[in-house]
Amino acid sequence: MKNSILCLLFCGYLILFCSPSQANIDNGIVKKVEKYFNEMTTLEGQFTQTIIKVNGQTFKDTGEFYFKTPAQMRFNYNSGLEIIASKSQLVMYQDKTDQITTIPLAMTPAKVLLQVPFYIIGNPKLMVLETGEDNRFLTASIALAQAQSLGSVKLFFDKNNRQLVKWIVKEPRQTTTISVSPTKIDGKISPKIFVLSRHKISTESSNIVDDSIDFDD
């Protein structure tokens, strides 16, 4: 009887104090993710994005992407949207409306990918939710430790070449899947790529107004 009570108490302890996700975390996979981001200098190529809203609406787009360490990323969408994330900001520019939106990077799941320095194990800013492995991919789901309500990022790495091929961003109101097809790895990317420039022709004159946001200022 005494042993049964002790067993029940022990099981209760496991339920209360041990996160279910801890059993699904392989530190070996986490270390491979860290190694990838620390050894990779640049990455560029094509991407396909699919957004599924909570109401079932689906939006698809394609374009070009650029990634450069430390912590610089740009997406040029064929629909006319441009997104640049660097340092502390994420900036979105829609050329059809000539509208710029600036969001603190720390308020977006993109911050997970743009940590400086990039490390996961022992990083108080990040939380690994789970890792996984199948015949094709190594995966790791990561969230901002102090802002888990913003969502999480699930990274997919090809098991054969260890390259990042996809990530899924889960947010309260939508799930975004970005599949990438790198065309150049560790090549040179001009710093100008990560400067958002706008060129507008005034309706009152032929003067061209050049506004830019340089993240290195």
Image (cartoon, helix red, strand yellow):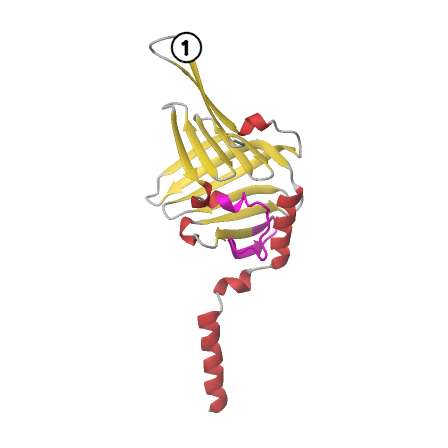
Most distant residue in the front direction = 217
Count the labels in the image: 1
In percent of width and height, residue 215 lies at: 51, 32
Question: Label 1: few (<14), some or many (≥20) within 10 Å?
Answer: few
Most distant residue in the bottom direction = 1
In percent of width and height, residue 151 lies at: 43, 49
Q: Nearer the viewer, residue 85 or 4?
A: 85
Query: Is residue 162 among what the camera can see?
Result: no
Residue located 41% across and 49% down the image: 150
Q: Is residue 124 above or below residue 98?
A: below
In percent of width and height, residue 207 lies at: 41, 10
**SS for callout 1:** loop
Residues shaded magenta: 111-139
Name the image quarter holding residue 41.
Answer: top right
Residue located 55% across and 52% down the image: 140
Q: Is residue 61 above or below residue 22?
A: above
* Kind of residue at badge 1: Asn
Horizontal side of residue 186 vs 71, given as left or right: right
Name the image quarter holding residue 95.
Answer: top left
Horizontal side of residue 203 vs 144, given as left or right: left
Residue located 59% across and 39% down the image: 70
Q: Is residue 136 magenta?
A: yes
Residue located 64% across and 51% down the image: 32
In percent of width and height, residue 157 lies at: 60, 46
Q: Is residue 67 magenta?
A: no
Provide the residue designation for mark 1: 207
Q: Nearer the viewer, residue 81 or 197?
A: 197
Query: Is residue 204 among what the camera can see?
Result: yes
